[in-house]
Image: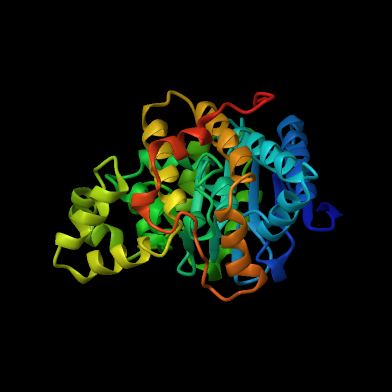
Amino acid sequence: MNSSNQSDVIVERRGTAGLIRLNRPKALNSLTIPMVRAIAVALDDFAGDEDVATVIVMGEGERGFCAGGDIRALHQSGRAGDGLAEIFWREEFRLNHRIANYPKPYVALMDGITMGGGVGLSAHGRHRIVTERTRLAMPETGIGYFPDIGATWLLPRTAGESGTWMALTGLDINAADAIHIGLADLCISCSRLEELVVLVSNLPVGSSSVDVDAALRDLSDQPGEGRLEVNAALIDRAFRFNSVEEIVATLAREEAEFAAETRRVILTRSPTSLKLALRLLRAGRQSRTLGECLSRELGACMQILHGHDFYEGVRAAVVDKDRNPKWSPAAIALVNDEMISRFFEPPKPKLAL
């Protein structure tokens, strides 16, 4: 076994597998610019190494695979105007695109918390493994942001309107629902993940994704049932509209407790983020490539830094931790189309993929 420790990312070879381990367990392996760069370099090295058959990406610690980008750092960068937030997003989005087009079998172990940027590191891959501990979410509307990392490509292509539910509520889903809606492939017990690594690392050079699928299937479990699958018809009825107001009104007419809870959660989110997320999702549904969505998202990122809600949302969630953001505008009805249109300015310079 050959390895190199790049502090927050550990890169090593185990047999024929290239292993990338996110190594910030106290921060739930949240991503920084150096981490994104280290992962990108490792992927390039493994792609060019004839002795590497597969790549495995996993997180250190038992709590999570990756909780996303380091939002405290993004918050500080935006306030300072130092350009680091833009650098992070550009490099992260290029990495997401690289993963989606990776030439070798790419195995992501989505054990524990897998949110935001963690979804970007996993759901774009070919072999996406969840466990009984998986809690997958795109929670951005709760911090005055929006689902990025190519989520506006991924979520519109999930089962029914489940991706719209995820984007607007920001709530997490379990292993069963991740597989049901198409963001994961297999459920394997967390107690067998080391066995998985050993199995994959012993596959012969030249193994295909079909070979990896066959090997992993022998370790897989039935994931049980998830709330999105159970409430699929209700979700499709309520979230098929192109306006947040219609979605909220439809939820109010539903009798199920699931609808009431969903509506309650949505009404706590940033009104601007809700409308931006929905419009980006609908644009993503019509897009032809992941690259189009990533570019559109980057343009929105640049505008987020000039608004109010992102800074207020991060303040309430991770700085002061009072969980009581004061959104501006404070109500969905006060956010008009013109306010949202400004987020659709193309990024300058363009996103290089």
For the residue pair 26 and 338, the one nearer the viewer reads as 338
Q: Is residue 19 left or right of residue 7?
A: left
Mark yes or no: residue 66 visible: no
Q: Is residue 55 left or right of residue 188?
A: right
For the residue pair 4 and 289, the one nearer the viewer reads as 289
Q: Is residue 58 left or right of residue 171?
A: right
Residue 305 position, x and y percent, is 64, 45
Residue 299 position, x and y percent, is 58, 33
Q: Is residue 94 above or below residue 9?
A: above
Which residue is rendered at x = 14% and y = 60% of the image?
Answer: 253
Q: How is the image coloured?
A: rainbow
Q: Is residue 275 above or below residue 218?
A: above
Which residue is rendered at x = 63% and y = 44% of the image?
Answer: 306
Which residue is rendered at x = 58% and y = 26% of the image?
Answer: 346
Taking the view exactly as shown, the residue that stands out farthest to the bottom is 322
For the residue pair 130 and 217, the one nearer the viewer reads as 130
Residue 144 position, x and y percent, is 53, 55
Residue 88 position, x and y percent, is 72, 43
Mark yes or no: residue 206 visible: yes
The quarter holding residue 70 reads bottom right
Tally of numbered discs: 0
Q: Is residue 317 above or below residue 35?
A: below
Which residue is rendered at x = 23% and y = 64% of the image?
Answer: 259
Q: Is residue 84 above or below residue 177?
A: above
- Quadrant in which the C terminus appears: top right
